[in-house]
Image (cartoon, coloured by chain):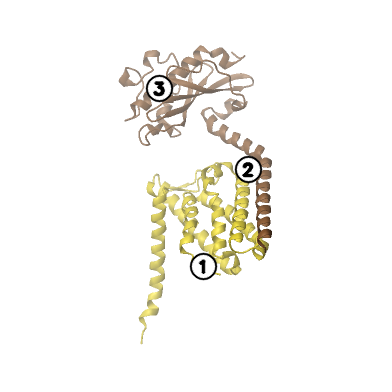
Chain colours: A yellow, B brown
Amino acid sequence: MIRPTNLTNTLMLMLLLGTSATLAGALGMLLMSSVVVVVYGTCIGPLRSRLSGNNLMLASLLLAATLTSCANILAQRWALQWQQSIGIYAGLIALQCVVLEYNGFFRQAFAQRLKFFGLSSGLLLALAVLRELFGQGHIGRGLSEHWQGLVLFSDGLHLLTLAPGAFILLGLLLAARQAWTRSNALPKETHHP
Amino acid sequence: MSRAAAFVALVLLAGAGLGLTYVGQRASAPQIASEQRLLDSRRLLDLIAPDAYDNQPLEQPLALTDTTLSHSTLLAGYRASKSGQPVAVLLRTQTEGYAGAIELLIAIDANGRLLGVKTLRHNETPALGGLIGDWPNQWLATFTGKSRNAPDDAGWALKKDQGQFDQLAGATVTSRATVNAIHDALRYFDEHRATLLGSGS
């Protein structure tokens, strides 16, 4: 059952905007959230056939919270420096799982899920690259301990490193996409007999 | 599923989740602690060249006495040594800045000369006093090489206080607090040289 998704999808915006400050943070968060979502998807199957409604939401919340906590502990163990800079957003992965469950994401066909995953990770990475490049002037700092990143500018627009700048950039990207799809659709509309 | 069965299932799920998280936390705690120690040592010990010492200074904090100094308080002390001979002493002090406490890490070599100063925590105004938080730091680097005797006690002040040190532009209180804290640390090192350097020279 597909429910109206606009308002609930805005809950996923926090994770997108918070972790896209740097490329290293975004890549790590992408890895962590995809692992958690995949494991969650496999585990919720048997529960979905036995529970329904509010009980299913509660079960999905418990499962998502458990998986996110375990993923957080593993991230602390293997990548402590990354976890200390981005780890406060790790808890939002559980929220993302529950929102996706509410929207019926896990019951869609595999191709659709893959398309959604591709689009959302593309958006996250695009935001991260733009924000780090124009906000700080370098790309890739934090990916390795010895590499300072590809430094292209000495300074950047500080606004982009903050959340309001991220909102503005997201709005600009959406407007650009609108303009692109509209310019592609235009030729089809003018040929009217 | 009946309500009772669903309730039991949820309780079991909650219990399993809590148990799994607890077990995971307990199993990973030692590795996380050692990673944290590694990160800390990299952050705190980059004042001294890595090949100048071969012990683990942060593992054996020194026992300090009389830690309340005239303008600051000593929080901790560490000794870096090479082949048993003390190479440097790291003192962690806290002083009152313009908008809260400033925590500094001061590295003094065995002869009482400053190796470097680093700011660990501060709450100062971002573009004014907050410049002490940058690393590597141009202003803090001007203290390297100074000691208790060079400049003398009267020289350990800002230029506007008839001393020798420039201040950060627009941050008199911050600069004064930092200069006083460093001078305090050097005086403390002088007075407790034997304890701080240990059994070495």
Furthest toward the bottom, the residue is A193
Residue A74 lies, in percent from the top left, at: 63, 46
Tag 3 secondary structure: helix
Q: Quadrant of residue B25?
A: top right
Q: Amino acid at mark 1?
A: Arg
Determine contact: label 2, label 1, CB under 8 Å. Answer: no
Q: CA distance from mark 2 to mark 1?
A: 39 Å
| Quarter placement of the N terminus of chain A | bottom right
Task: Name the residue tied to disc 3.
Answer: B179
Task: Name the residue tied to disc 1.
Answer: A3
Tell me the tag on residue A77: 2
Q: CA distance from mark 3 to mark 2?
A: 39 Å
Q: Amino acid at mark 3?
A: Val
Determine contact: label 1, label 3, CB under 8 Å. Answer: no
| Quarter placement of the C terminus of chain A | bottom left
Between marks 2 and 1 in the image, the one whose residue lies nearer the viewer: 1
Q: Residues within 10 Å of mark 2 (few under 14, many from 20)?
A: many
Tell me the tag on residue B102: none
